[in-house]
Image (spheres, grey):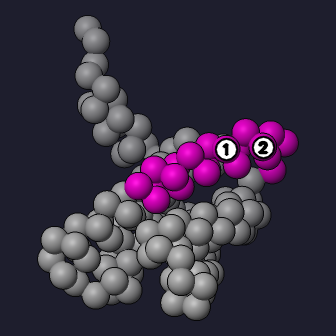
Amino acid sequence: MVIPFYVNFYFQLLKYMSFTKIFFLKFLKFGIVGASGMIVDFSLTYLFKEIVKIQKYVANAIGFTVAATTNYFLNRIWTFHDTTPEVTIQFIKFFIISLIGLGINTLILYILVNNYKKNFYLSKLFAIVVVMIWNFTINLMFTFKG
């Protein structure tokens, strides 16, 4: 019998999200790293949007990309204590997941700002929280699964 993809994915998710003290500690560390990334992200987004006057979604992508790069190294060393020698492959996985997160982030931002006329930075904060959950879950399952 062939198990549908989404059922298999659900069981994989449950396997990796065993709600133990170690899981919560990793999530907390991931959140702390994410908070530092949020400072980098917001700072660069503000710099490029308000001072350099780059289009807001391009400024958002710059902030997000730099934050994702710093977050990779902090998560590799501190959150997941990963020593995998294939850093380049692991970084590419992390970055692809982050790019998907950027797509989710930008979509949420676009919908909230353009369709619902919400504040850009409050919308960005909401998008970051949603993407943090996405990034933690998928990186736990695929990037730092060791």
Helix, strand or loop status at disc 2: helix
Report the span colored magenta. 83-103
How packed mark 2 is, by other alpha carbons closer than 10 Å (few <14, some 14-19, many 20 or more), is: few
Residue 68 image position (x, y, % from top left): 61, 64
User: Mainly helix, strand or loop, the magenta region?
Assistant: helix
The residue shown at (51%, 44%) is 141
Task: Report, in whole angstroms, how far the alpha carbon at label 2 lies from the one at label 1.
Answer: 6 Å
- Residue at 23 percent across and 67 percent down: it is 111
The correct choice, above or below, for 84 with respect to 116 in the image is above
SS state under label 1: helix
**Direction bottom: furthest residue:** 51
The answer to which of 141 and 54 lies nearer the viewer is 54
The vertical placement of 55 against 136, above or below, is: below
Q: Do callouts 2 and 1 mark residues in contact (Cβ within 8 Å)?
A: yes
The image quarter in which residue 47 lies: bottom right
Q: Residue at x 47, y 74 (%)?
A: 55
The quarter of the rendered structure image containing the C terminus is top right
The answer to whether residue 64 is above or below residue 81 is below
Asked whether 141 or 53 is in front, the reply is 53
The residue that mark 2 highlights is: 88
Residue type at mark 1? Ile
Disc ID at residue 92? 1
Instruction: Estimate the x, y position of residue 36 in percent, counting from the top left.
Output: 61, 82
Q: Quadrant of residue 124?
A: bottom left
Quadrant assignment for the N terminus: top left
Q: Is residue 138 visible?
A: yes
Q: Is residue 87 magenta?
A: yes
